[in-house]
Image: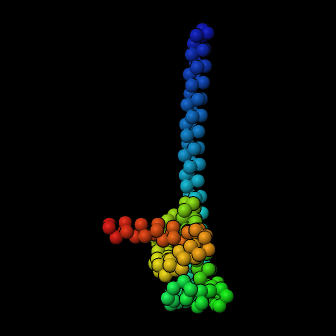
Amino acid sequence: MVDLANIQSIYYMVAATCVLIAAAYYVSNIRTTQRNMRMNLETRQAQLFMQIFNRFNEPDFFEKFTQILSWKWVDYDDFLKKYGGKTNPEAWYSEGSIAAFFEGVGLLVYLQLLDVKLAHALLFRHVKLFWEKMKPISLEMRRQLTLPHIDQWVEYLYIELIKIEEKELKS
């Protein structure tokens, strides 16, 4: 005959086993969910990267970009006379379009929605050329218009990409 103590012992063992199985199942589900989230994030990063790559790779982008690199000016006033919105709206739009693209990428990097290493692999040379060309104009615009945020994400992106480049050169 089975006594009450044995039944209770069996009940406790079954209950403990069920708790262990539930805990193991829960841990397994968490790991699977984390793995799926990581894969989902990587997929989104790849999709975002390809959208940026596609825009970056458009002939219109490169035409505007190379035009900007060929511009010559003496100072801020000379820049405005040659390429300002009132005198040369097409050039003004070209510079604004390229700056806006790099601003967007810089903000995505800042918000950690785009891995800075991906941005570096694709854009380092272009961001470097653009910012070093336009920096004096952007800084003077900030000062004259009292708008300290003009091209701030281009500058941020430039600084972050330079950090990566310097690390790579040291290795």
- Number of on-image labels: 0
Frontmost residue, 63 versus 92: 92
Residue ID at (58%, 53%)? 37
Frontmost residue, 67 versus 142: 142
- The quadrant in which the C terminus is found is bottom left
Frontmost residue, 95 versus 140: 140
Colour treatment of the image: rainbow
Residue ID at (56%, 81%)? 57
Q: Is residue 124 above or below residue 68?
A: above
Residue ID at (32%, 67%)? 170
Quadrant housing residue 87 = bottom right
Measured from the top left, where is residue 149 in percent x and y? 59, 68
- The quadrant in which the N terminus is found is top right
As drawn, is 19 to the left or to the right of 169? right
Residue ID at (61%, 19%)? 11
Q: Is residue 162 visible?
A: yes
Measured from the top left, where is residue 96 in percent x and y? 62, 80
Measured from the top left, where is residue 44 in percent x and y? 60, 63
Measured from the top left, where is residue 19 in percent x and y? 58, 29
Q: Is residue 126 visible?
A: no
Q: Is residue 124 above or below residue 45?
A: below
Judged from this view, the residue extending furthest toward the left is: 170
